[in-house]
Image (cartoon, grey):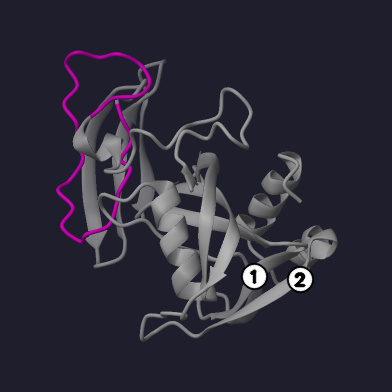
Amino acid sequence: MTDDTAGRYVRTGHPTDANVAGGTNATGDTDGASDESWTSDAPTFTDGRRHDWPGTPEWPVIESQIEYETGWVQAGYDLVEHPDGSRKRYYWAELPTAVVVITRADDRLVFVEQYRPSIRETQLELPAGVVERGESYTGAAARETREETGFAPDTTALLQTVWCSTGLLRHRRAFVFASDLTPVEQSLDPSEFVTPRSVPVDDAVDVARTEPTNDATVEGVLLAREEGLL
């Protein structure tokens, strides 16, 4: 069972998963201030992943340029006009939308052990991955849980969506709770070297906060605890 409306576990007012399968901002829909003269500056993405592009700006964007692009990230700047009329370039890096999964198996929480070359550390972290184009957050969470941990969740619920590191990144992240697990075969990408680990639910916060760790793992575990799921 999936819960794309976030109505089972989540307090009223949290975001839902009902209308976001394609990455609505990337299609030109607006959020924020209304500006009938604004035309979406979202690029055309052809990588098969979901991208959530910012909507209508509250401060005028005079120019938006992409200066660096790979198959995984693109970076550039917006030349923005401040309320006092001054202007400044705000640099950003854009990444595909991602999902982080808090996976509970009875009285244990499922983590994965993974080496992260970017920080040269092995971490115990929550399962996570990129949302594919056309997937809901909960659908992506179920897929990532199957692939990384070897468990298929029957129940998923969206807890929260956030923008990450907003001083630099254009990167949307969702947190999903998964439970009612059935063992399946782990299915990793050729470049993934991931080992599932489980810890007692009572120890989950301490484990998540033990160095080395990352923001997604700490945030996900604390969100689940706040919702009364741990």
Residue 124 position within the rendered picture, expressed as x and y whole percent measured from the top left: 67, 73
- Work out whether mark 2 precedes mark 1 in sequence or the reverse, and give the earlier one: 1
Q: For mark 2, what is the residue?
A: 199
Q: Residues within 10 Å of mark 2 (few under 14, many from 20)?
A: some
| Residue drawn at point x = 55 percent, y = 68 percent | 182
Q: Nearer the viewer, residue 208 or 121?
A: 208
Q: Is residue 187 left or right of residue 128?
A: left
Which element type, helix, strand or loop, lies under badge 1? Answer: strand
What's the magenta region? 29-55
Check whether the beta carbons of the residues at disc 2 and disc 1 lie within 8 A of each other: yes
Q: Kindly identify the amino acid type of the residue bearing the numbered disc 2.
A: Val
Quarter of the image where one finds residue 211: bottom right
Examine the rendered structure and indicate whether residue 144 appears above or below residue 112: above
Where is residue 25? Give x, y as percent.
29, 35
Mark 1 belongs to which amino acid?
Phe
Q: Toward the viewer: 190 or 158? A: 158
**Res. 111 mark:** 1
Q: Main SS type for the magenta part?
A: loop
Q: Which quadrant holds residue 56?
A: top left
State whether residue 216 is above or below residue 124.
above
Q: Can you give x and y, in whole percent of width and height, for residue 146 in the image?
A: 47, 69
Determine the CA span between mark 2 and mark 1: 8 Å
Residue 63, compared with residue 69, is above or below; it is above
Residue 172: in sight, yes or no?
yes
Q: Quadrant of residue 210?
A: bottom right
